[in-house]
Each structure stands twice: as structure tokens, then as C-alpha cells.
Amino acid sequence: QTKAPEQKGRHAFRLSFEFFPPKSLEMEAHLWESVSDFTEWDPEFVSVTYGAGGSTKAPTFSTIQRLMSDTPMATASHLTCVDAAREETLAVIEELRAAGVRHIVALRGDPSAGIGTAYQPHPEGYANAADLVAALKDVGGFEISVSAYPEKHPESTDTNADIEMLKRKADNGADRALTQFFFDNDVFERYMDKVRAAGITLPVVPGIMPIQNLSMLKRFAGRCGSTVPEFLDRRFAGTEDDAVARAEVAADVAAEQIQDLIRRGLGEFHIYTMNRSALTNAVLERLGRQRVSVKEGAVA
Ligand code: FAD
């Protein structure tokens, strides 16, 4: 469902946006108020997360359906295989196809007993994301994205184990990897050197997390395997009681990170939007990206 190549090239870099299914009416309002902004940034695709074990299946589906009916954005669904028998996962894949979805972000998902506990595959399920990718390839007709972890997945013994899993996902037919968020571009570059040295040619798209709230980020980053470097404390120092200043710093930090990655030769970014456009707008404005008029399909 990625746009035709002739539509690429009007921007200096390509974009995708990640959303999660809103958990309340208030959160739903945030997303739908933001959606015209997101559309105007002309992403290659947007994706909607899927709760492990199918816990958000209904809201994920309804969010995808509304995005597909109300916006021109190519919409991908995340799909996890944790806690599901193969038949159940295959049934969800068919439901996604029937709903018009042609791009799946294929994931294993977190252990059902909680992050940090040992992962137990469902006895009749897919053991990991590489197996899910192979199943999706057998089913056919889907573009497939997968995860990648520049700082390694918390369960992995070492980076090599992680890269081995990425290789399996690539060999089984994944089209691109989207990374877990990270803030140190040197770490990403070292990771990419290892990925390429392992013979993996898959496009690896940096996941960028504009920081809505540094304290909250610190609480969950560790569980995702992402480091929050000390320089961020210095950048946000003194903004604790000033939401406007905080947002300015957050936009500066994310825009500088993307700018630096562009200098290093990267041309595509996956933004964790948290369903709100204000911060994403500020980041993309700093980078000089042109909005595209939704009605005319032309650069505004
Ligand atoms: P895999 O690719 O199968 O494995 C990831 C790494 O973990 C591997 O590199 C491997 O080294 C290691 N590993 C895997 N299994 C084991 C094991 N048994 N023992 C030791 N090491 C192991 N979660 C959701 O619930 N819903 C989402 O929509 C969602 N979207 C995501 C999108 C992106 C871009 C990313 C980066 C993550 C997302 N996640 C999501 C989180 C993801 O489900 C978790 O990180 C999960 O723990 C691993 O899933 P995976 O597909 O990355 O696993």
C-alpha cells in the first residue's frame, strides 16, 4: 500500500506515522482532530498498533477502518502473534485483508505475563516474528514491515542475537524494518554497520520519538530497550513548569536528530506520534517540510 514511486521525491525525506487505538473518547478526539495535519505531511503510510494477544483488536480495526475511509493515507495494521494459535492469527490476517489492509507490521508481541518475564510461545502459535513473516508471505498479498532494535531487545542476550532475528525476518520476506526509538545516532550507525555486515540489505527506518514528557519517557524507555541519554536532562532542564518551553525543546531535539540522520544518509523516518499532531507539526516545520494540500494533492 505504499504510494507509487512517482509520488516520492517531492520531499527531502519520506515519513510514516505510528498511532495507537484511542483508549477513551478524549483520546479519540485527539487523534481525529490531528488527522488532517498528519495527512498534510504526506506520509508514505501510517500504522496502528495492535495489543498483544488481540487485546485491542476491535479498536485497532475501527481506527484503521476510519483512517481508510476518511483519509487518503495508506494504512498499515500492526499484528502480534503472542498468545494466539496459528489458526487465530490466520483468521485475523483474513479479516484485515477483507477490511482492505495490504500492509502489516508483523510482531511477536510482549510476553503475556509482563515485560521481563520469560516468553512462552503459544503451543500452537507462531514462535516469533520471523515465523509470522513466513506465514504472511505464504498467505500472500501483504507488504510486511518488522521491528528492529538498535540498542537490542531487552530479552536478547546480545546484539548479535537481535541481528540474527532481523536476518531471519528479512530472509522470510519482510520488506522493511522500523526501529524501536533511540536518541543516540552513533548507536544507530554502529548497529547499521553490524546489520549490513551480516548481509541484511533490508531498509531499516529509524523510529523517532518526539518527547512529550521526559519523566514519563524515562519510566517506559527501559522496558522498550531504549536508553534515555543524559544530554536530554540538560536540554529539558528548567522546563519542568513550562509546557511551552518543553514543547520547543522536544521539537528541537527530534528535528536535530532527524537532521543529523539525513546528514548521515538516511531518507526515511517513522514517527511515534502518540496520536497528537502538535509536536510532530513543530518537528516537521523545523525541518522545512512542505505540507501538501489534501484537496488538490499538490505541495501547499
Ligand atoms: P521478535 O522480532 O520475534 O524478537 C525481537 C528480539 O527479541 C529478537 O531480536 C530476539 O533476539 C529477542 N527474542 C525474541 N524471543 C526471544 C526469546 N524467547 N528469548 C530471548 N530473546 C528473544 N507490541 C505490541 O504489543 N503491539 C504493537 O503494535 C507493537 N508495535 C511495535 C512496533 C515497532 C516498530 C516496535 C519496534 C515494537 C513494537 N511492539 C509492539 C513491541 C514488540 O511487540 C515487543 O518488543 C516484543 O517483545 C517483541 O516483538 P518483536 O516482533 O520485536 O519480536
Image: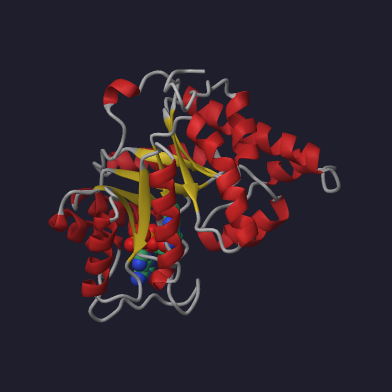
**Residue at screen point 24% across, 41% down:** 199
* Visual colour scheme: secondary structure
At which x and y percent is residue 149? 43, 51
The answer to whether residue 18 shows anywhere in this view is yes
Q: Identify which residue, 107 or 263, lies in the foreground.
A: 107
Report the label total. 0
Q: Identify which residue, 90 or 168, lies in the foreground.
A: 90
Q: Furthest residue to the left?
A: 138
Question: Is residue 122 placed above or below 158 in the rendered structure?
Answer: below
Question: Is residue 259 placed above or below 217 in the rendered structure?
Answer: above
Give the image quarter of residue 131.
bottom left
At which x and y percent is residue 170? 24, 48
At which x and y percent is residue 63? 45, 55
Which of the four quarters of the rendered structure image does ligand 1 lie in? bottom left
**Residue at screen point 43% across, 47% down:** 67
Question: Is residue 233 placed above or below 4 in the rendered structure?
Answer: below
At which x and y percent is residue 42? 45, 30
> Along the horizontal axis of the image, is 235 left or right of 108?
right
The answer to whether residue 156 shows anywhere in this view is no
> Along the horizontal axis of the image, is 116 left or right of 237?
left
Give the image quarter of residue 197.
top left
Give the image quarter of residue 135.
bottom left
Quadrant where the N terminus is found in the figure:
top left
